[in-house]
Amino acid sequence: MAGKIIANLIVMGSAILGRAFIQAYRQALANASKSGVAQETIQNTIRRGSKVMTEQEARQILGVTEQTSWEEILKKYDTLFERNSKNGSFYIQSKVHRAKECLEAVHQGKGEGTPT
């Protein structure tokens, strides 16, 4: 008898807490939209999602310097890309590819001809 009462109290208490949580969450969303916090959060998320790799980051990923020739960059790229395609990480492989694309754009922008 006492176990049944305790179980009912736990279930009712959980339901009350659940409703209170949902109501508090809705109120927090309403307050955030009034103050513009929600819009700012969305904008920050968009900015982070479209983050472009910097030249410095690309050079660090490939392990090259500013004086490294394009041929050496391609050798580093091929080595790292192949190494990660066989038994590595797809994430690292995509970072290596993005680094090559970034440095390719930098070389084209400097007027050093089209990298091959």
Image (tube, helix red, strand yellow):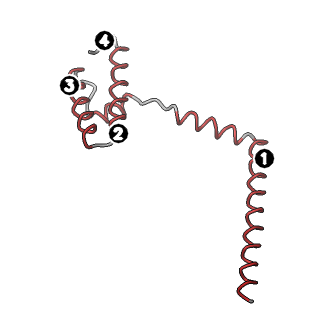
On the rendered image, what quadrant is the C terminus found in? top left
Badge 3: few (under 14), some or many (20 or more) residues near its Cα, within 10 Å?
few
Which residue is depicted at the point 77% across and 73% down?
Answer: 12
Labels 1 and 4 touching (C-beta < 8 A)? no
Residue at which label 3 appears: 72
Residue type at mark 2 is: Phe
Q: Residue at x 64, y 41 (%)?
A: 41
Provide the residue designation for mark 2.
Answer: 90
Where residue 44 appears, x then y in whole percent? 60, 37
Q: Is residue 110 left or right of residue 50?
A: left
Left or right: 19 in relation to 42? right
Mark earlier in primary sequence (3, 4): 3
Q: Which residue is mark 4?
A: 114
User: Element under label 1?
Assistant: helix
Tell me if mark 4 has few (under 14), some (14-19) or many (20+) residues whose alpha carbon lies within 10 angstroms of its own: few
Give the mark nearest the N terminus, 2 or 4.
Answer: 2
Residue 6, x across and y down, in percent = 73, 83
The picture places residue 20, in percent across and down from the top left corner, at 77, 62
The reply to whether discs 2 and 4 touch (Cβ–Cβ < 8 Å) is no
Which circle, 2 or 4, is nearer the viewer?
Answer: 2
Q: Position of residue 79 (x, y in %)?
A: 21, 33
Seen in the picture, residue 37 relative to 70 is either above or below; the reply is below
